[in-house]
Amino acid sequence: MSTVLYAEAFAKEMGKTKCGTIALIGSVAGDRGRKSNYVYGAAKGLITRYAQGLQHRFADTGVKVVLIKPGPTDTPMTALLKAKGVKLALVEDVAKQIVDAIKKGKPVVYTPNKWLFIMRVLQHLPHRIFNKLDI
């Protein structure tokens, strides 16, 4: 909720000036609930829906809302994944893609780019197939 509260404070001021960019960091985890991280995913799903609403609110103004959806990235939060041998994105690469997306005012950016394809597949899998996956 703190992300939403902070963004609302910025949105209030940007709404007055009708310019600026609000960048929100969600996650690929917010695209579909998974047993391995459903609480985290639910929180990130909230960010996704909030960003969509904010984008709609500012659609006809000069205010841009950029939703950033990183995949697993080499940070302290993912240290256990790294210890298990999971390949993680480099922070520097993710940061560059985020900065580029903000400059362009892209509504949504998946970083690394491969996560757009991966998440589209997962989003469209029928429940009976998805529920058999150990992810």
Image: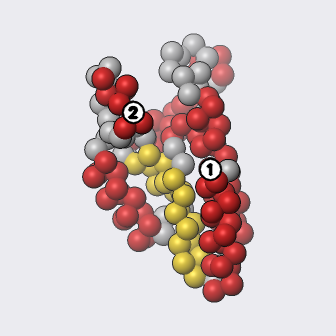
Residue type of the residue flagged with mark 1: Thr
Q: Residue at x 66, y 22 (%)?
A: 127
Is the image coloured rainbow, by chain, by secondary structure, or in one colour? secondary structure
The single residue placed furthest to the top in the displayed view is 132
Q: Return the residue at label 1.
A: 48
> Which structural element holds mark 2?
helix
Going by the image, does 135 lie left or right of 32? left
Q: Residue at x 31, y 48 (%)?
A: 91
Q: How many marks?
A: 2
Residue type of the residue flagged with mark 2: Thr
CA–CA distance in space, label 2 to label 1:
21 Å
**Residue 118 position by quadrant:** top left
**Residue 31 position by quadrant:** top right
Q: Residue at x 31, y 28 (%)?
A: 82
Q: Return the residue at label 2.
A: 78
Mark 2 vs mark 1, foreground winner is: 2
Q: Nearer the viewer, residue 48 or 5?
A: 5
* Label 2 or label 1, whichever comes before in sequence order: 1
Residue 69 visible: yes
Q: Position of residue 60 (x, y in %)?
A: 67, 78
**Residue 52 position by quadrant:** bottom right
Going by the image, does 18 lie left or right of 26? right
Residue 62 visible: no
Q: Position of residue 92 (x, y in %)?
A: 27, 52
